[in-house]
């Protein structure tokens, strides 16, 4: 294979990721064929294998690209907010907004990737843990400021926040209906912040 520049190689990788995202979103992982993705990217099947090795490797690359972007965006948005409560509200809103901005990948992750037999401990699982770790850092700040009671179960809060939003958002992601980001984010934030606040310890 002729040698190409690093910039050209990266351009090819990006075009493959864009094409793969579209095909995976439209057909699902199992039904998506390598030749469908290669055709959408305008390259040969062999070149796709050269860059990503397998369909599973390409899927993980698509997911990795997605998670790196949303982790960076979430970290940036949260860091610009002032104080625990505003950081918490910002995190919730950014997460809900992801279901609108990236509905195709959210649908793919929920319906297929997380149901893989080897999901626990997989690269996909580790990426998700990195994403949710942003919440844990915000919670630690709340504890240090005295805004959050110290005995909270961080796994329970994590599951209630991300699981609750996913449950509400799924009907919109799976059907194409419009999700009211501000309403959902406001409701979730109010419910959880009230429960976590040191002012409301029973």
Image (cartoon, grey):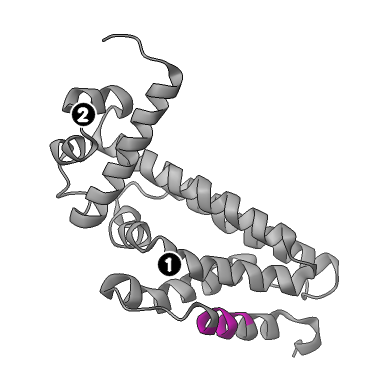
Residue in the image at 29% along x and 51% along y: 116
Work out which residue is located at the far top of the displayed protein and give it. 2
Q: Which residue is mark 2?
A: 43
Looking at the rendered image, the disc whose residue lies closer to the viewer, 1 or 2, is 2
15 is higher (above) or lower (below) than 115: above
What residue range appears in magenta? 183-189
Q: Is label 1 in contact with label 2 (beta carbons under 8 Å)?
A: no
Density class for disc 2 (Cα within 10 Å; few <14, some 14-19, many ≥20) is some
Q: Which residue is mark 1?
A: 99
Give the CA distance from mark 1 to mark 2: 31 Å
Query: Residue 158, located in which quarter of the rendered image?
Result: bottom right
Query: Residue 5, located in which quarter of the rendered image?
Result: top left
x then y, percent, for residue 31? 14, 50
What secondary structure is marked by label 2?
A: loop
Location of the C terminus (image quadrant): bottom right
Query: Is residue 100 inside the magenta stretch?
Result: no
121 is higher (above) or lower (below) than 188: above
């Amino acid at each position: 294979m002729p040698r190409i520049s690093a910039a050209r190689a990266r351009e090819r990788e990006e075009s493959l990721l864009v094409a793969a995202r579209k095909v995976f979103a439209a057909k699902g992982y199992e039904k998506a064929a390598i030749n469908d993705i290669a055709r959408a990217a305008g390259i040969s099947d062999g070149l796709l294998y050269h860059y990503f090795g397998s369909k599973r490797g390409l899927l993980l690359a698509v997911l990795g690209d997605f998670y790196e972007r949303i982790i960076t965006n979430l970290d940036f948005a949260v860091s610009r907010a002032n104080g625990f409560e505003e950081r918490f509200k910002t995190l919730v809103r950014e997460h809900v907004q992801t279901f609108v901005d990236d509905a195709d990948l959210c649908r793919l992750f929920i319906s297929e990737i997380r149901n893989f037999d080897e999901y626990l401990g997989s690269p996909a699982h580790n990426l998700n843990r990195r994403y949710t770790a942003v919440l844990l850092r915000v919670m630690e700040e709340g504890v240090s400021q005295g805004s959050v009671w110290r005995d909270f179960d961080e796994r329970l809060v994590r599951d209630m926040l991300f699981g609750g939003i996913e449950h509400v958002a799924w009907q919109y992601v799976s059907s194409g209906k419009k999700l009211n980001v501000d309403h959902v984010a406001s409701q979730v934030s109010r419910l959880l912040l009230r429960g976590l606040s040191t002012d409301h310890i029973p």
